[in-house]
Image: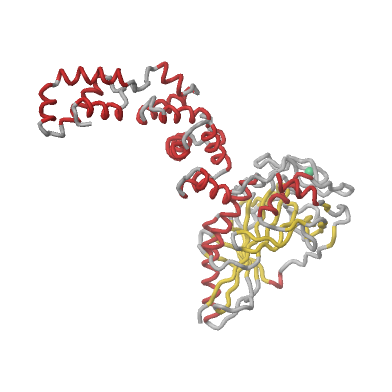
Amino acid sequence: MTFEPVIGLEIHAHLLTASKIFCGCATAYGAEPNTQVCPVCLGMPGSLPVLNRAAVDDAIRASLALGCTVHETSIFARKNYFYPDLPKGYQISQYELPLATGGLFEDVRITRVHLEEDAGKSLHEGFLDSARKTYVDFNRTGVPLIEIVTEPDLRSGAAAADFFTRLREVLVWLGVNDGNMEEGSLRCDANVSIRPAGGQTLGTKAEVKNLNSFRFLQKALEHEIERQIELVSAGGRVVQETRLWDAAAGRTVSMRSKEEAHDYRYFPDPDLPAVVVDAARVAGIRAAMPELPDARRRRFAAQYALPDYDAQQLTQSRAAADYFEAAVAAGAPAKAASNWIMGELARKLKEQATDIAAAPLSADRLAGLLVLIDKGTISGSMAKNVFETMYASGRTAAAIVEAEGLAQIDDEAQIAALIGEVVSANADAVAQYRAGKASTFGFLVGQVMKAARGKANPKRVNELLQKALGSG
Ligand SMILES: [Zn+2]
């Protein structure tokens, strides 16, 4: 019997607000433990949560990008469980009435997008023995999150990793999440089951947690699918449980079974009113949404006649796409701008470990250089040196070309005069050329370039020399 895997994802994404979801504490990552806390996020008796409007806006933005319907009314609920990093004894989340539902993204149906607060973080030191210590850092407690839940529409580990990659791209593009999986601001859990190929019913699923990279997601799913197929083929059955990906061992291991699963006893949070988002607010956010990566990619290919590869590369980030369009707006030919951004500029940025958003060379300045090449004022090879000087000094290309006397000689009379000198000084070579020795032409071009100290426009020299020798 052949089996098909059935995979759904649950993705947690931190929202990039300056303060937490229900209090004014900062959300910056990496602060000294327990320095970004207050009575509200520590769950002190008598403290009351107040919803951060910016977090709701970010969540709406993400929901719209995923094609979801944003509901006018959603409700915060308490999800009760005991854990040392959860000081209130419950997490504020949304349960029965989430913010948004019913989306579609990359051919995967989005079940829901809801808002919630993050829990704190336990830091373990030492092994599981008497010497083991656990510390708790509450800085993360109350950082706003959205949870994105998909329908079980994915059919392989590679497809799941690809979907997660696309989703990350959009969240980062929208500026609602920083995409940093290592720091835990974007996390993914996967529900996996198998069923006979082509079947309709769902098998018993296992949940795989702690998948903090695209590669781990793919490998963990591939391993888990294999494990379930072997188990069922041998006459066993899959039990509903939570499993962890052990990256070092390259396999998933059981964490807790259904019997040990939490009973969260959800109920509406009595301290928080319903979240009401009227149609005007949603419309305003929708109108201000940036063009999304896929749309911008297609537009770049069409509007600027760029190859798909270029359009793909230039839309890796909003900053790169903006840079390209600013260069074109400043007069740079589109394909040249694309080549230089992907080539020289990318190399320089990589060398200095800088992002294009912080590039010391503005798009305007780069355009200035590309215009000079386009007009024939400088050659492509000279332009590379000018680029280096521009990048280091911040001066304009025109100023550098002027100060260093780099402008090409493109004037017909001036080049014709140089050719005249070369022709009379090399009578032998000219005679050979006229007698049919074509290779002599290159030598004569070289002599003209030498006389011009390398600055003559080579294309013009070729044209005029052919004319002078009577073959043009
Ligand atoms: Zn706080």
Vertical comparison of 226 with 218: above or below = below
Along the viewing direction, whichever of 227 and 278 lies nearer the viewer: 278
Question: Which quarter of the figure is the C terminus placed in?
Answer: top left
Which residue is the extreme one toward the bottom? 235
Q: Which quadrant would residue 440 be assigned to in this image?
A: top left
Horizontal and vertical percent for residue 102? 71, 62
Horizontal and vertical percent for residue 421? 20, 17
Q: How is the image coloured?
A: secondary structure
Q: Which quadrant would residue 398 be assigned to in this image?
A: top left
What residue is rendered at 51% in x and 79% in y?
2
Q: Quadrant of ligand 1?
A: top right
Going by the image, does 393 lie left or right of 422? right
* Number of dots carrying numbers: 0
Vertical comparison of 407 with 287: above or below = above
Vertical comparison of 18 with 43: above or below = above
What residue is rendered at 72% in x and 40% in y?
18
Horizontal and vertical percent for residue 445? 22, 27
Horizontal and vertical percent for residue 281? 79, 47
Going by the image, does 373 lie left or right of 23? left
What residue is rendered at 54% in x and 40% in y?
320
Going by the image, does 226 lie left or right of 153? left
